[in-house]
Image: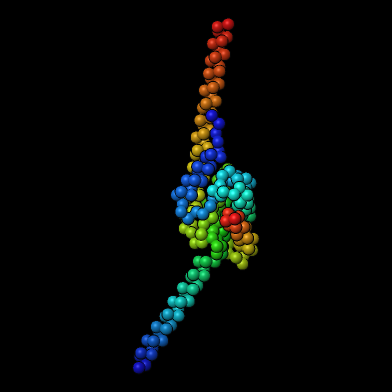
Amino acid sequence: MKARSAVGLLAAGAALAGAIVFVRTKSAVEREHVDVYFGDGSMVSLESGSSDGDRLLPLARRALAAARG
Amino acid sequence: MVACPRMDAAQALADLTEISAQIEAAVLADHDGSVVASTLADDGAAKSFAEAAAELLAAADDVRAEPGSEPLVQVEGASLDGSVFVARDDRHLVAAVTKPRPTVGLVFYDLKTCLRMLEREEEAKAAKATKTATRRRTMKKETEEAESESS
């Protein structure tokens, strides 16, 4: 009986951990950002909340809106 | 024959939208945002899009402003509604919009291919125009020489 409870708890814990990882990964992928690429192949990723990100994201949104009318 | 960069640009954009299913709309412009060609039917929208893309590039240039730093070549702005891509070469910029979560590398590859195609076509037309002008000059000189010999 105790063994069964332990397995059940473990399964529930694993499912919870999986759900957390899934949600975190999905939110990271969908986060708004601006990626700036340079001539040497390097790239700077600027997310909303950073000063450069907050400066560039509205411009990106404006370009998107202009193209879609 | 006079080179017609606008026709070259329109062809380059047509090829771009044909090869890239992810791209919804695209515009080719000079670095100051003057539209060269666009897939948008509305000229006003094309102008606004090109200007916004040029402004995004200019603003992104300030991210690494130290002297001697590598030049900026391309930018992707990703919002929840979609992404905007801007790539540039020495003369032009090309901007495109896609749906959310595009294949970033592929879109940039297609934009750079578009810029390369335009550059090649312009070079070919310029070379042809130079060749024609040289031939005309040679013919004119030969005619003048023949006329002076006969008189």
Q: In the current view of this chain or complex, which residue is farthest to the front?
A: B41
Instruction: State whether residue A9 is above or below residue B143.
Output: below
Q: Is residue B91 visible?
A: yes
- Percent x, y of residue B93: 57, 47
- Percent x, y of residue B124: 50, 35
Count of number-bearing discs: 0
Q: Which residue is pictured at 56% across the width and 44% down the height? A: B37
Q: Quadrant of the N terminus of chain B?
A: top right
Pick whichever, B53 or A65, lies toward us: A65
Q: Which residue is pictured at 58% across the width and 6% down the height? A: B151
Report the colour scheme: rainbow
- Percent x, y of residue A35: 55, 59
Q: In the current view of this chain or complex, which residue is farthest to the top?
A: B151
Q: Which residue is pictured at 51% across the width and 46% down the height? A: B13
Q: Which residue is pictured at 60% across the width and 59% down the height? A: A61
- Percent x, y of residue B109: 47, 51
Q: Is residue A42 visible?
A: no
